[in-house]
Image: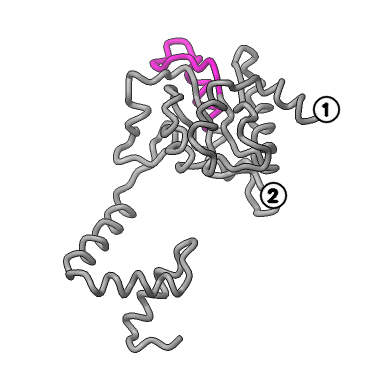
Amino acid sequence: MEYPSLLLTNAVDEFAKLPGVGRKTALRLVLHLLRQEPERAVQLGESLIRLRREVHYCRMCHNISDSEICSICSNPQRDATTLCVVENVKEVMVVEATRQFGGLYHVLGGLISPMDGVGPQQLQIDSLVERIRESRQPGSTTPRVQEVILALSTTMEGDTTNFYIFRKLGEFPDLRVTTLARGVAVGDEIEYADEITLGKSILNRTLFTDSFGQQHT
C-alpha cells in the first residue's frame, strides 16, 4: 500500500516491527496518534525513550526495575528462603497476580532451546546457582535459600530447562527443588494460565523428582 507521506510510511514501518503488530494495525495506531493533540505523541515518545534509557534489571533476580534492586527483592516482608524460577518478566507478573506466592523470584531470560540457538550460557542459570551458594556462605547477609520452585512452561523447552537446572542444583543436597502441580496442562505456557489454576499449582507444588518420575513412567 502506498502512503501519501514518507513520514507516515516511516512511522508505520517502526510500529510494524513490534511483535503481533501487522501493517494494518500499525497504520491504525499511527493515524490514531495523528488525531490526538501533539502533546500526546510527545508524551508517548518521551516515555519510550526514558523506558529504554533508564530501566534497570534487578541485579539479584533480573526482573525489570526502576532501581538496582527491584521492589520485590527489597521487600523485607517477602520470604527470601524460597525462590521461584520463571522464564521471563511476564511470568513474574502472572505469578504475582495469583497472590499465592510470597517468596522471591529468579528470571532466566528464556528457556534452553538448541533449535533456536539458546543454550544454558545465554540464560541466568549460573547466577541462580551462585545466588544460592552465596546465601549459604558463613556470615551471609541474605537468608539461606531452602527451596527453589521451577515455575517454567510445561513444554519440551521448559522441561529441558527444568532438568538442567535440577542437575546444576545437585551440589546442594539439602535444597528442596519443587515444580508446579500439573494443574497447568502439559504443553501450556505459564503466561497464559488463568490465575486460579496457576495459584493452585503453586500451592500444591510437588518435589521435582516426583514430577520427573511421573513424566517418564
Q: In the orientation shown, which residue stands out farthest toward the right?
A: 217
Mark 1, residues whose alpha carbon is within 10 Å: few (<14), some, or many (≥20)? Answer: few
Q: Position of residue 185 (x, y in %)?
A: 65, 37
Residue 1 falls left or right of residue 4: right
In-front residue for pair 104/94? 94
In-front residue for pair 76/121? 76
Residue 187 lies in the magenta stretch: no
Say above or below: 167 vs 187: above
Q: Secondary structure at mark 2?
A: helix
Is the residue under label 1 in contact with that under label 2 (CB below 8 Å)? no
What distance separates the C-alpha of mark 2 from that of mark 1?
25 Å
Q: Position of residue 181 (x, y in %)?
A: 62, 26
Residue 129 lies in the magenta stretch: yes
In-front residue for pair 35/158? 35
Quadrant containing the C terminus is: top right
Question: If you read the primary sequence from the N terminus, does the residue marked by circle 2 or circle 1 appear first?
Answer: 2
Residue matched to label 2: 114
